[in-house]
Amino acid sequence: MKDAKQLVNLVLEAHGGLIKWNQFNTVKAHVSMGGITWGVKGHEGVMNDVYFTGNMHTLLDSWSPMFEAGLRTSFDGKDVLLINAADEIIEELKNARNSFEGHNIMTPWTLLQLAYFCSYATWNYLTTPFIFALPGFHFLEMDPWEENGETWRRLQVIFPDSVVTHSKRQVFYISEDGLLKRHDYWPEVLGNNSAAHYFSDYTEVQGIKVPSKHRIYPLDDASNISLAEPLLVSIDVLKLEYI
């Protein structure tokens, strides 16, 4: 492995650059999520048509409508709130991460556990790679990887404890032009089951390049090859804007 400063800078610039990113504070996205995970967790269809609003520089976000019309969530990186149209808190999950202790991929989730997972995961997806500029990240460039007739550079990222995410260690695969192509992680809230997350259908929004399709599959750690099925999670970003 080797120092990855040059590679990190390439990735940041390819996606629009920090100067452009820092001109905005809020990301809003209309998304549709599919895959088997929601049904396995007992909440088939809940994320089919939802709206995400998040702070771009710190983990504060919300979903609406969540579970039924008039309800929304609020997440501060630790606690999840369910709020009604009158701005009343009707349910809360404090120290949400602790509630997943002992879980595996088949363990059912409560609605607020699902909201927790979607909140931190989507915030990570919509702010990557720019969160790499936050304090406490560590990077190493790994050996390149060949897939689909392409050679991708690989970036090992160790996340700081201050960033709520899937797993402390994650690996990103980067095309020749600096765009993210694949992202491997081992989500703690799903029993550390290995996952390979693919980015595609890039579009440019207000000077920022973002993938409009995310597809997440099981990963075979021994071969480092993703499995064609089942599709664990799909995310289609139908509309996105920065404010």
Image: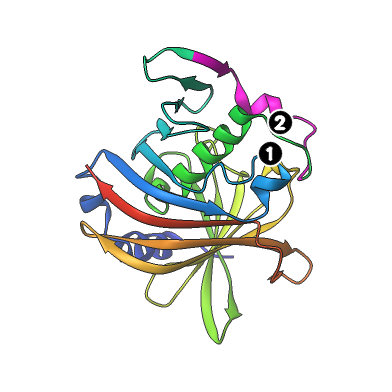
Image location (x, y in percent) of residue 32: 47, 52
Looking at the image, residue 43 sits to the left or right of residue 49; the answer is right
Q: Report the coloring of the rendering.
A: rainbow
Q: Are marks 1 and 2 in contact (CB under 8 Å)?
A: yes
Image disc number at residue 100: 2
Q: Secondary structure at mark 1?
A: helix
What segment is highlighted magenta in the picture? Answer: 90-105
Residue found at x 41% / y 32%: 62
Residue 194 in the image: above or below residue 151: above
Residue lying furthest front in this view? Answer: 69
In depth, the one of 36 and 202 nearer the eye is 36
In the rendered image, residue 99 lying in the magenta stretch gets the answer yes
Measuring from the top left, give residue 37's x and y in whole percent. Answer: 67, 49
- Percent of width and height locating residue 38: 64, 46
Q: Residue at x 48, y 33 (%)?
A: 66
| Kind of residue indicated by mark 1 | Val
From the image, tell me which residue sits under label 1: 189
Q: CA distance from mark 1 to mark 2?
A: 6 Å
The correct choice, above or below, for 74 with respect to 2 in the image is above
Q: Amino acid at mark 2?
A: Phe
- Can you say which quadrant of the picture contains the C terminus? top left
Q: Return the x and y of residue 166 as percentages of the image width and height.
A: 60, 44
Number of numbered callouts drawn: 2
- Rendered image quadrant of residue 100: top right
Quarter of the rendering containing residue 84: top left
For residue 144, say whether it is visible: yes
Q: Is residue 112 left or right of residue 83?
A: right
